[in-house]
Amino acid sequence: MDEVADHQVRTGGCQCGAVRFRLEGAPDAASICHCRMCQKAFGGYFAPLVEIGGARLEWTRGAPAYFQSSKVVRRGFCAACGTPLSYEWPDGIALAHGAFDDPAALPPSIQYGTESKLPFTDHLAALPGRPTGQEPGSYLARVVSRQHPDHDTAEWPP
């Protein structure tokens, strides 16, 4: 995170680098939404989101494409790689938590849509784990990443 004129500055973007954003100012709460619509939009067990509140959002490279997921909510995503980027409603915008370059700096503080919470999510931390590439017979040692790095670049791809 950079400091500019006493304002927090956070950056992020999609996996391929076609869409990047800059958030200046302190965002509101980070959350996890378990509702079925968010599960489908993120293709996951839940949607981790960060409400921008009074912070200023600027799309610095490209712009999201949108899907109007309900009468009042549209969801932004990268048209090139499919990364979920935003959840937008009449009173605000939330950004996908994992799209931030430093998602660890914004720990979630509340959960929504708990009526649709998948019952096993409370036990994920208890599952055994392995570092990336240490799976038996892993193909990951041969992977060459095309993912945009977790910082702004003058242009992408290089």
Image (spheres, rainbow, N blue to C red):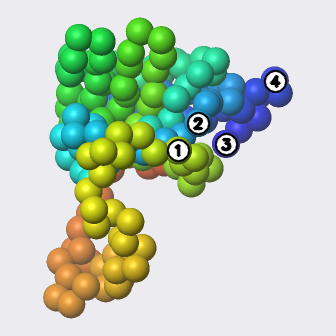
The secondary element bearing badge 4 is classed as: loop
Which label was assigned to residue 110? 1
The quarter of the rendered structure image containing the C terminus is top left
Residue 49 lies, in percent from the top left, at 44, 38
Which residue matches tag 3?
1
Question: Given the image, on which type of amino acid does mark 1 rest?
Answer: Ile
**Dot 1, how many residues are within 10 Å of its Cα: few (below 14), some (14-19), or many (20+)?**
few
**Dot 2, how many residues are within 10 Å of its Cα: few (below 14), some (14-19), or many (20+)?**
some
Residue 29 lies, in percent from the top left, at 58, 36
The secondary element bearing badge 1 is classed as: strand
The reply to whether callout 3 and callout 4 are in contact (CB within 8 Å) is: no
Question: Residue at the location (46% across, 45% down)?
Answer: 111
Question: Residue at the location (38% across, 15% down)?
Answer: 89
**Res. 158 in view:** no
Query: Looking at the image, is 75 positioned above or below residue 46?
Result: above
Which residue matches tag 2?
29
Which label was assigned to residue 80? none
Residue 69 lies, in percent from the top left, at 20, 21
**Dot 3, how many residues are within 10 Å of its Cα: few (below 14), some (14-19), or many (20+)?**
few
Q: Residue furthest right?
A: 6
The reply to whether callout 4 and callout 2 are in contact (CB within 8 Å) is: no
| Mark before the other along the chain sequence, 4 or 1 | 4
The secondary element bearing badge 3 is classed as: loop
